[in-house]
Image (tube, rainbow, N blue to C red):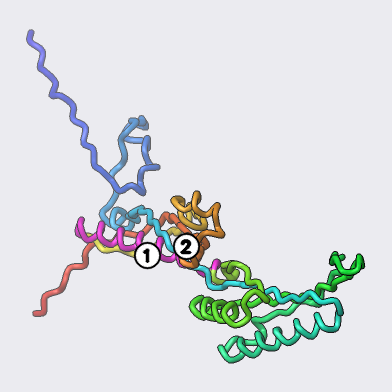
Amino acid sequence: MSLQRTPPSRVFVELVPWADRGRENNAVSGGEALPGLRRPVSSAQAQSATREVHVSGTAEVSASPDRAQVAVLVSSTKEAAAEAKKSVCRRLDYIAQSLQQQGLQAENVTVTKDFRRVENAYHMEAENTKRACFIGKQVCITFTEFGKMQNICNFLVEKLDSSVVISQPQFYHTPGSVENLRRQACLVAVENAWRKAQEVCNLVGQTLGKPLLIKEEETKEWEGQIDDLQSSRLSSSLTVQQKIKSATIHAASKVFITFEVKGKEKKRKNL
């Protein structure tokens, strides 16, 4: 007696959206669970599942210093303190007048208090020791225009010569400019990520939806260029432009964004 061959069993599997991944190992007929299989979902459930695209974006921006400070030392050494003070005041008036003519605001000029020192000046005159009085004032000038700063410093050196000592300019950033730089780096990184997601969706024939998650993953800040570290050690020998470049602040940002993905909307034909 021959036995009939039973037909081979068949298993049908339907791929479902990613949102239904948690429904794996659901019960099937007979109450048994088959790992790796998922129950098919309706077309309405498949359409309601959220599709996403994950992209990252980076940006690097920089800002030159917006302030520079120069210190001008005005001093005089006389035997009489009154004469030394008169000499210093006369040159201070000249400096103040020159700064005013150049359009510099009074709040950007600070004059320190008098400082004086009495030194022993040895002169071989009748074997007598004379005392000399040193009186000086320091003028701190803050500039927002670096070209004007160079012109004023050159003018003071030309007119007052060795009677004044002008320090090297110190370049720096105001707190508000640094915060704006950080914010700009983040915004540019977000824009770059959005453009990347837009191009990806266009490539695969989809429409980019609203952002679901925006996260700034990494930020960096540094001053000057790495190649300038060795030359910055000799700051006194740097030009003004090299000093500005050395004081330039760079900021970098990296963001991660999740966007919703929508299908292409079909255009309705007018009847």
- Give the residue at x 31% y 63%: 195
- Which disc is residue 191 wearing? 1
Density class for disc 2 (Cα within 10 Å; few <14, some 14-19, many ≥20) is some
Secondary structure under the numbered disc 1 in the rendered image: helix
- Which disc is residue 211 wearing? none
- Give the residue at x 13% y 24%: 7
Amino acid type for the residue under numbered disc 1: Glu
Q: Is residue 78 left or right of residue 205?
A: right
Q: Is residue 104 left or right of residue 120?
A: left
Q: Residue 205 appears in which quarter of the rendering?
A: bottom left
Measured along the vertical axis of the image, is residue 256 above or below residue 122?
above
- Give the residue at x 47% y 62%: 242
- Give the residue at x 49% y 57%: 224
Outermost top residue = 1
- Check residue 264 for magenta coloring: no
Q: Position of residue 92 (x, y in %)?
A: 71, 84
Amino acid type for the residue under numbered disc 2: Gln
Relative depth, front residue between 116 and 149: 116
Asked if the residue at tag 2 contacts the one at tag 1, i.e. Cβ–Cβ closer than 8 Å, the answer is no
Q: Position of residue 110 (x, y in %)?
A: 70, 79
Q: Residue 15 appears in which quarter of the rendering?
A: top left
Outermost front residue = 126
Count of labels shown?
A: 2
- Which disc is residue 242 wearing? 2
Magenta residues, start to end: 178-205
> Is the stretch drawn in magenta largely helix, strand or loop?
helix
Question: Rounded to the nearest whole Å, what is the CA distance between mark 1 and mark 2?
Answer: 32 Å
Measured along the vertical axis of the image, is residue 13 above or below residue 248?
above
Q: Position of residue 255 (x, y in %)?
A: 43, 56
Of tags 1 and 2, the one toward the viewer is 2
Q: Earlier in the sequence, mark 1 or mark 2?
A: 1
